[in-house]
Image (cartoon, rainbow, N blue to C red):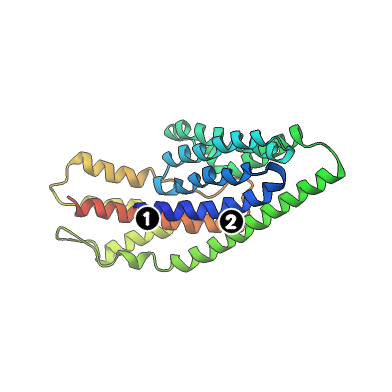
């Protein structure tokens, strides 16, 4: 992780949320243009992993909720309730993750739907005009989300075929990690999320100078990894996208472990 990658992720997130801000301008005024700068903070979460990423997402949603409440429009208020619930859910996800519970982030789409339903019920006045505006807004969000998700899906499918080749050849202080057997274990972890063969190879091949505590930390990085597959409301095509993203996350995890070994 470097500063350039963080800036790139932030800008990508800012572009996405800026589109939401433009959609909201009729309801929230100029405040809607400030909200994306906070929401884009959540785009950095993937660089920090779990559970630290949950705190970044909470930091993105909670101030955004406060800003939207200042706008006092019915739609912006409904979204403020949604963001407030999302922010609280991500904040709670941090201590829950430490206890082995990832229910909230795995079902965050359902949390968002429930939050928006609650916000709409509290602030949207029943009228044909308001209902049509609400439906237009939901449709615009859905189309935007689908378009970006499809773009991510195509990108991940294109990149996933190159993931394994990025490791080869790799040598760590005279220990050859590019042997066929090791390549196979790396492939099993990246492709199938099976860490056991890779842990065996680490135990066999790490230098003797590595302390037990350092080795335990490496093994813990593999054993504590939990793939994200989506929640109850996640459609099948989006589950496939998540699977591709998790594959890249596992590849980055192996790179991180090899980088650590190279420094010993």
Is 233 situated left or right of 228 in this image? right
The one of 177 and 56 positioned closer to us in this rendering: 56
**Relative to 217, is 17 above or below?**
below
Dot 1 falls on a residue whose secondary structure is helix
Q: CA distance from mark 2 to mark 1?
A: 28 Å
Instruction: State the residue lying farthest toward the right.
Output: 128
The one of 89 and 224 positioned closer to us in this rendering: 89
Q: Position of residue 134 (x, y in %)?
A: 76, 46
Is 194 situated left or right of 212 in this image? right
- For the residues bearing labels 2 and 1, Cβ distance under 8 angstroms: no
**Relative to 138, is 90 above or below?**
above
Residue 103 visible, this orientation: yes
Residue 52 location, quadrant: top left
CA neighbours of label 2 inside 10 A, class few (<14), some (14 to 19), many (20+): some
Residue 1 visible, this orientation: no
Residue holding disc 2 = 238
Residue at the spot 66% in from the left edge and 40% down from the top edge: 79
Residue holding disc 1 = 4
The one of 242 and 196 positioned closer to us in this rendering: 242
Residue at the spot 72% in from the left edge and 41% down from the top edge: 75
Dot 2 falls on a residue whose secondary structure is helix
Residue 98 location, quadrant: top left
Q: Position of residue 19 (x, y in %)?
A: 62, 54
Decide which of tag 2 and tag 1 comes sooner along the chain.
Answer: 1
């Amino acid at each position: 992780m470097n500063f350039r990658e963080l800036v790139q992720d932030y800008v990508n997130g800012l572009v996405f949320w800026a589109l939401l801000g433009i959609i909201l301008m009729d309801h929230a005024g100029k405040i809607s243009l400030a909200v994306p700068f906070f929401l884009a903070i959540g785009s950095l979460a993937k660089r920090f992993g779990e559970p630290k990423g949950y705190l970044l997402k909470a930091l993105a949603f909670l101030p955004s909720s406060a800003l939207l409440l200042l706008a006092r429009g019915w739609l912006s208020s409904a979204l403020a309730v949604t963001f407030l619930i999302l922010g609280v859910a991500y904040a709670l996800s941090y201590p829950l993750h430490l206890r082995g519970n990832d229910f909230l982030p795995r079902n965050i789409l359902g949390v968002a739907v429930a939050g928006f339903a609650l916000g709409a019920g509290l602030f949207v006045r029943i009228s044909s005009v308001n209902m049509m505006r609400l439906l237009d807004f939901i449709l615009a969000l859905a189309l935007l989300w689908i378009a970006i998700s499809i773009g991510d899906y195509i990108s991940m499918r294109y990149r996933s075929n190159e993931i394994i080749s990025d490791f080869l050849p790799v040598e760590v202080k005279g220990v050859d990690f590019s042997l066929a057997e090791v390549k196979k274990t790396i492939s099993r972890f990246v492709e199938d999320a099976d860490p056991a063969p890779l842990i065996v190879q680490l135990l066999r091949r790490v230098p003797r100078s590595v302390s037990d505590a350092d080795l335990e930390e490496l093994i813990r990085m593999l054993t504590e990894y939990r793939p994200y597959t989506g929640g109850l409301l996640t459609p099948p095509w989006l589950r496939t996208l998540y699977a591709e993203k998790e594959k890249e996350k596992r590849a980055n995890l192996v790179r991180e472990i090899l980088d650590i070994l190279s420094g010993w």
